[in-house]
């Protein structure tokens, strides 16, 4: 399937550390990035968003009936009902973009590794939200006395290393052994989560996206653990790839969702 051409539509990707607002207009795109953080309020985000119905907003939490009903990454937005064209979960937004090149009728998943871990699933070529639209909260999977978020999320890596993202990047670039080991351990934990997901749904493809995937060693460790833990017949037939859309994937999916809504 050819990639959709978006014109004059905006996608906003709200995450634990930043708000990425992308205006798509054919081959051109305008990007604005603003810092967030666990203390940010819904009113602050609302003020930063463009006032237009041609806006899709993706958030790192559960969405129900146009409101954010749960969000451990940004607790200040729980209960928020933003004035936007479309509100959806960030992994579900990423899945919308990822499905543009998904073979018809395929079962697949996308896993977002950012501040925390989220996922979205397509079954037989259709997005699967579960009974209430909340399916895909992979980060809450119990693991080693905590959760997958606690072992593989970007926030957990930074806590373990005792530094911010900029400092961690510098330490990794300098070959700092403890930092590199922490990132690899987190990647291995992600790989175990991916294996669990693959063993449950037998997907043709799992796509990885999110800022934590950019840290050296993280994806390699995830791939190694995935290959080791996933049932061999499933692993042999499941493509494990990184998103071709890079940092735009969530914003792009949110923009597609907004465009579809406005055309109805």
Image: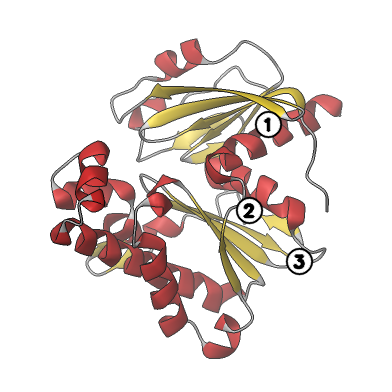
Q: Are marks 2 and 1 in contact (CB under 8 Å)?
A: no
Q: CA distance from mark 1 to mark 3?
A: 24 Å
Using the rendered view, name the quadrant where residue 77 is placed. Answer: top left
Residues under numbered marks 2 and 3 in contact, where contact means CB atoms less than 8 Å apart: no
Q: Examine the rendering and report whether any part of residue 78 can be seen.
A: no
Question: Which of the marked residues, 1 or 3, is nearer the chain's N terminus?
Answer: 3
Density class for disc 2 (Cα within 10 Å; few <14, some 14-19, many ≥20) is: some
**In the displayed structure, does residue 43 sit left or right of residue 37?**
right
Residue at image position (54%, 16%) is 49
In the image, is residue 188 above or below residue 159? Answer: below
Residue labelled with disc 1 = 255
Outermost residue on the front side: it is: 174
**Relative horizontal placement of residue 261, taking residue 227 as reference (left or right):** right
Q: Which residue is mark 2?
A: 129
Task: Between label 2 and label 1, give the one nearer the viewer.
Answer: 1
Comes first in the chain, label 2 or label 1: 2
Answer above or below: position of 26 versus 50.
below
């Amino acid at each position: 399937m050819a990639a959709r051409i978006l014109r004059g539509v905006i996608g906003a990707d709200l995450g634990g550390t930043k708000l990425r607002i992308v205006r798509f207009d054919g081959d051109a795109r305008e990007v604005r990035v603003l810092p967030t953080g666990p203390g940010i309020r819904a009113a602050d985000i609302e003020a930063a968003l463009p006032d237009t119905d041609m806006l899709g907003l993706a958030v790192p939490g559960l969405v129900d009936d146009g409101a954010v009903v749960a969000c451990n990454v940004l607790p200040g937005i729980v209960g928020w009902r933003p004035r936007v064209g479309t509100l959806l979960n960030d992994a579900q937004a990423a899945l919308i973009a990822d499905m543009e090149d998904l073979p018809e009728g395929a079962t697949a998943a996308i896993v977002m590794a950012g501040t925390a871990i989220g996922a979205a699933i397509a079954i037989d070529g259709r997005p699967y939200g579960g009974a209430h639209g909340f399916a895909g909260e992979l980060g809450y999977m119990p693991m080693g006395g905590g959760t997958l978020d606690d072992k593989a999320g970007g926030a957990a890596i930074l806590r373990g290393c005792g530094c911010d993202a900029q400092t961690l990047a510098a330490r990794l670039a300098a070959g700092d052994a403890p930092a590199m080991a922490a990132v690899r351990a987190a990647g291995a934990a992600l790989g175990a989560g991916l294996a669990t997901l693959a063993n449950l749904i037998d997907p043709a493809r799992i796509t990885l996206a999110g800022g934590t995937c950019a840290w050296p060693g993280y994806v390699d460790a995830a791939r190694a653990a995935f290959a080791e833990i996933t049932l061999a017949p499933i692993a042999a037939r499941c493509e494990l790839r990184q998103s071709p859309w890079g940092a735009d994937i969530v914003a792009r999916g949110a923009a597609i969702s907004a465009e579809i809504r406005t055309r109805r």
